[in-house]
Amino acid sequence: MSSHTGHHSTVTVGFIVPFRNTTGLLMKKLFSLVLLLMLLDLQISFSQQVDFAYGYSSALNRHYATINDMELTSDSLLLLTGTAWYLNGPDEYFAIKADLDGNIVTIIRDDTTGSVGEGQIIKELSNGNYLMVNFRTSYGSSYCPSLMFYTSTGNFLFQNFPYIPPIDTFFSPSGLVEIQSNLYLIGHVYCSANGYDSCVIIKTDLDGNVLQINWLPDLIPTQYHGGIITSHGNILIGGMSSDTVFANRKPQLTCIDTTGLILWQQTYNIGSLYSEVDEICELPNGYLLGLNRFSTLIKVDTTGSLIWAEPQSSFSNGQIQLNYVGNYLATGRLGTVIWCDTLGQPLADYSLGITALEATETLILNDKLYIAGKAWVGSGSEGYLIRISDSLLTGISEDAFVKSKIYPNPVCSGSRLNFSIPAGKITSVTLHDLQGKLVIPTLVIHSEATPFIELPTSLQEGTYLISFSLASTKCIYRLVVMN
């Protein structure tokens, strides 16, 4: 087991595996040997990209654990929350503060409140306190959200229940945002008696006192926290339309203001049964959406109108991040990491070596990728934190291009476009418009002392994206063409 108390130079994965039936010491030893061989294999498969991979159930003294949310704190620590439980015991929430090397700084777990359930969302508030949204707090035959407030050192402050659902009604938290010192808890409300689904937005102050409750009956919000974000002072909510006929439900994106007023709502005729917008990533001129159940990335403009949709073979329950040149990272459910360029085309797709991984949150910090989530082990799961170093995190491969340029830019149609990328490393050059439409499928490279491309005289004035493809990556530049 990894102790998580110091720096680690090798990858270690620690899992506690319980036994449902006592079948003798020999069987236990045999099972442990098989698991050890599996973990050794994981270490080998991790060696290329992974700095570390930690399981935290042993530190929590529980059989199983999951990590459901991750946030970077103001003091540059990772704040993780999730659920831990014994083999036959109740679910218990927890939060972990860890440094950027995965070492535990503080474990937050307060048993004096009598609250059991699942730690679903963790957030550092503007007043410096931490808020954990605890799911599955039972009131008779209903489930309601519990807001647990802590100091930054992990001391329990108080608990608040902002919403008590009717009988036989279940509230599942989808996301939590803070705007101007007010909290907005977005959740999915389901009534088992009539099968009714809806979205509720609970506005509170920083102590969890309710200020306003709004209902959005035409939306079923996603269960993934990445599907709820703030944008330009408004709230974007991903999910699906709430048609009473399941087969008619479609992925949906809704923008509301802080009063609960719907500013715009877009429904996408993409995907199959239960497809929904599960992940939202803000772009300079729109948003990138993840449709996890349909394994698709879609790009939309600032009003949610569809620009393009690209299927991704490994994107399932994935998280989306951007690197500094605008390429997209998507982590898949089956332990995969996918890089796509700005047009949604795959740059790289590789496996971390564990087919049971499910990412729940990702962060890119200091050119490192942090993945938090859970790995299914036997009949339970292990909460994990993985850090990856990869050249694609910076958007530039080890081979070249730190100083690559295209010039002149702007350029006139019919003129030469020079570039400093070694021509021998380029496999193809294409030109797209800003909507992702292919304008020129192949631009011919003329190799002289300085390689160049001759733009056609028929190329219309406007702004384009020129893409240089290499063996393992792409360089994409914004190109302004004048007549």
Image (cartoon, rainbow, N blue to C red):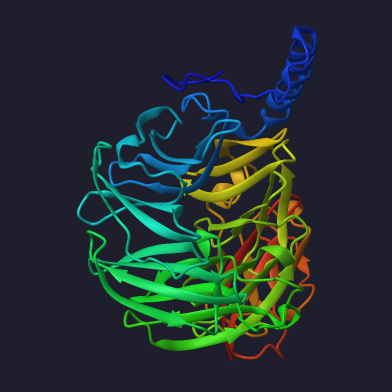
The number of numbered badges drawn on the structure is 0
The quarter of the rendered structure image containing the N terminus is top right
- Residue 451 falls in image quadrant: bottom right
Q: Does the image show residue 257? A: yes
What residue is drawn where x is 71% and y is 82%? Answer: 245
Q: Does the image show residue 386? A: no
**Residue 234 relative to residue 275: left or right:** left
User: Between residues 281 and 93, which one lies in front from this camera angle?
Assistant: 93
- Residue 109 falls in image quadrant: top left
**Residue 316 relative to residue 101: left or right:** right
User: Between residues 34 and 320, which one lies in front from this camera angle?
Assistant: 34
**Residue 144 relative to residue 128: left or right:** right
- Residue 193 falls in image quadrant: bottom right
What residue is drawn where x is 24% and y is 37%? Answer: 155
What residue is drawn where x is 70% and y is 26%? Answer: 20
Q: Measuring from the top left, give residue 190's x and y in whole percent.
A: 55, 70
Please identify the residue farthest to the left as the structure is shown.
Answer: 127
The quarter of the rendered structure image containing the C terminus is bottom right
Q: Measuring from the top left, give residue 157's x and y in whole percent.
A: 22, 45
Q: Measuring from the top left, give residue 423's x and y in whole percent.
A: 72, 56
Q: Measuring from the top left, give residue 313's x and y in whole percent.
A: 78, 59
**Residue 249 vertical position relative to residue 159 in the rendered view, above or below:** below
**Residue 27 vertical position relative to residue 469 in the rendered view, above or below:** above
